[in-house]
Image (tube, coloured by chain):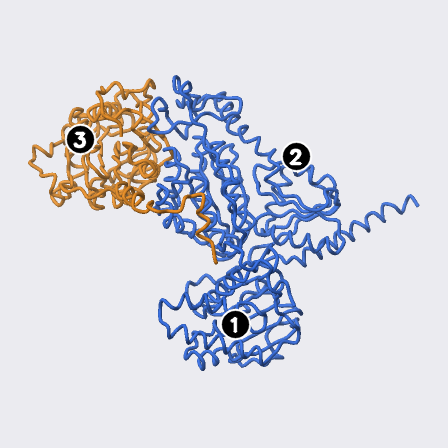
Chain colours: A blue, B orange
Amino acid sequence: MRKDLVFGMAGSGGDGIVSAGDSLLQAASAEGYHGVMTKSFGSQIRGGESSCRVRISTDHVLNPGGNLDVAVALNWEDFLKFGAELPVAGTTVVIYEAATGVPENQIPLVGVTPLQVIAVPIAAMAKEHAGTERAKNTVVLGLIAGWFGIGGEAVMKGISKKLAKKSMELVEANQKAFDAGVTFAKEHPLKADMTVVPSASKGKVKLLTDGNDMCAAAAIFAGCQFFGGYPITPSTEIMQFFTNHVWKYGGAVLQAEDEIAGIGSAVGASFAGKKAMTATSGPGLSLKSEMMGLASIAELPLVIVDVQRGGPSTGLPTKTEQSDLFAAAFSAHGDVIRPVLAPTSVADTFRTTVEAFNIAEYYQTPVIILSDQEIASRKETLDPIDTSQFKILNRLQPSGADLQDYKRFKQTESHISPISHPGMQGGTYLASGIEHVESGAPTNSGSVHQRMNDKRIKKLDPLKERKDLFEITGNPDAPLALVAWGSVAGVCREALQMAQAEGLDVKLMVPYLLYPVAEQTYTDFFASVQKGLVVEQSHLAQTFKVLRMHLDLPKGLQSLARSGANPFLPGEIVAALHHLLSELQRSHEGKLQPQE
Amino acid sequence: MSATCEFQAKDYKSDLKPIWCPGCGDYSVVQGIYRALAAIGRPPHEVAFISGIGCSSRIPGYTTAYGFNTVHGRALPIAQGIKLANPDLLVLAAGGDGDGFSIGGGHIAHLIRRNIDITYIVMDNQIYGLTKGQLSPTSQKGRTTCTSPYGSLENPVNPLLYTLAYGAGFVAQASPTDLAGMAAIIEEAIRYPGFAFVNVQSPCVTYGEEAQQIKGLKAISASLKELGHDPADRLAAMDLAQHYGEKMHLGVFYRNPEPPPTYDALIRERQVQLSQGALPKERILDLFIKK
């Protein structure tokens, strides 16, 4: 029996493979399992290849998993297009459509001998039992229920609920397709028992959502009352959530005419005193960068979400990458620091988003949330979040005394000045993109510019002291280390557990605050480190380079970096750590020899 | 909205001294705005005045309203965010012809079709003054400037026809040649419930052509009222607007006699409707509960 199973399924758009994944995850969640589902598509909207990975576990799931335990191919052409996104290994059970005509001993996976390969006449079973090949995905769900013990009643309950709106005949047809799948599985038992042990948390309330919806919900919780944006994959669902819900909280959302107007309207709303947000992906971030400069100099709170995808330009618009760090940290004119935060999962997208609003409002600055396609569109089961544990910060309002002789950009000890907004009597001022004196009046003075730059940059210094924006796990004195952020952090968390189980002395740093770089926190972390890896999905190794720019890294710290849509597997990171350890041991031996 | 009380033009004038060239048409525009705001009587702190970049975009700083001198071409996107975030505010936007019809030329069409209650004043001088005399989107074809030394090969944008064609509910033209008339037009534009556009022929004394100075403008000016134009007649307005550049028609080209509801008002209605029985925001994550 198993505690953790990773399914990977691929087919053509229209095969319903992603909705099968959805049903599986929902059913597993109803049965008390933890789970994560990621989707991956070609960039066609219809008819292209589509796939999903569903990981089901009795314990919290840290990432979508490494090699597949179960691979489902409705056709081989589509399955193979996903390459490393659906890795098959010697431990994988491969289930595929018999109508492909491929013999079980000749499946087109080079260099691997799967645990077991089973051709199933999926389409024919769907046709025979449900009267239509469209029920293929339901047959697959039946197979999964039969072989792996997941889903069962809960799957059909979910499907019935969905289909009952259409017709009862459809429900019956799907029940037959499902049962046929279960029967086939029972009649063809697997060589190894791969059923999942029942979950202990059955019946407990769980949340099930993706990173984009979580981000938008967290923003509304944090008090966001305005969203301005423009549709761009893979961030659009954030705007969609706002269009459904923000009105209920007295807020507004604008699908603007372009990316610039999207952020522009959010800058305007913030000037008007409301918490505001925009969301985009890499190309949109480029278009928004002038407005981010304006928000910085006018000291206006604003949250900008960049759901990263493969770039540059349209790049890989439906796949994940971590290659916008340079853009987020540095795509600014002038000397400016914009805080950049990154969530690592759907669950902590809540916390990260609330934190982004708190930082934006408290420090009166634009803040970027660097999410990525994987977190944004993956579905996760989560334990309920106690929102009363989260503190909400608001911008500093001027006091009556401040308004007697109001100076919008008044120098203070914290470098933070009380901020008024239109409608507030006594608080009128000129906000501007031009350099200004304390009152807001324009100036060309070099000395004022120096002082104001100092104010705008120094007010953010306390952020670097925030230890709670870093997660450090493992032995604090370990000689081996991993650094990872965003969706890659989840892979490294699992790698850390595996490495520790194998006796490696290793620790992991996951920064939620990427910029400004908290030099001291990293320096302290690296103090014990002799060898380590900065793991990231960026061909240029942007994180490694940003760190190197800001601090002296240990000589043994290396970069493990590659382009997006080539996911890291926990196992390969553990192997890399073993390699580092052996290097370390060799170098110690080398050093010791002359003394002997 | 607070009760209106008596305000005078000087109550809207700030302490900042304008840095425009002596004789610049924009001095008259700011005077016209002071007068219009005083006639309307909203206190300065309930007015948000947004501009882009250019000589004319300095204008919010010369008023006592909440001003925002933003980035080139983006007065309107920012102004719309302000109005949607707080529809109670009186929102004015202003800028030059380059700001409104070149770098930011894509925005005006969308504000018009949304019908957000903002008044947009363009100080149209057919030249880039702040950057010292380059070709602008409203420069006449054939004009020589420092970026068109052999004469411009481009036809100018017609701001009046442009805004009329997109369906603006209020389109007017004013000029410093008639300050009282300009103040009255700006006042009417602000009072119009919906997006209102005022093109002001505001001469550039430093880089403008002779024909576009006050004297030249006076020579080609004609009052729409005196011509007997009916501002409810959109097609007649478009016909007259075709003469932009040859004639300077002053007054209201078009005023929708039956103004449709504004976007900001519709948003309000939606907020009221949908807030009934909504989950408190502390419980918004309940939306994700799967049983």
Q: Same chain for labels 2 and 1? Say yes or no.
A: yes
Q: Residue B74, how many percent across, how many down? A: 35, 37
Which amino acid does the dot numbered 1 rest on? Glu
Q: What distance separates the C-alpha of mark 3 from that of mark 1?
A: 68 Å
Which amino acid does the dot numbered 3 rest on? Ile
Q: Is residue A204 left or right of residue A243?
A: right
Residue A361 in sight here:
yes
Q: Which residue is mark 2?
A: A520
Q: Is residue A279 left or right of residue B56?
A: right
Which secondary structure, mark 1? helix
Q: Which residue is mark 3?
A: B185
The structure residue drawn at horizontal position 32% and vertical position 35%, both measured from the top left corner, is B86
Which chain does tag 3 point to?
A: B
Q: Which residue is mark 1?
A: A77
Residue B92 in sight here:
no
Please identify, in this view, whether the residue under mark 2 or under mark 1 is nearer the observer: 2
Which amino acid does the dot numbered 2 rest on? Gln
Image mark for residue A33: none
Q: Residue A465, how many percent across, how many down? A: 61, 33
Mark 2 neighbour density, 10 Å: few (under 14) some (14–19) many (20 or more): few
Vertical side of A439 occupied by A165: above or below: below
Vertical side of A103 occupied by B223: above or below: above
Which chain does tag 1 point to?
A: A
Q: What distance separates the C-alpha of mark 2 from that of mark 1?
A: 50 Å
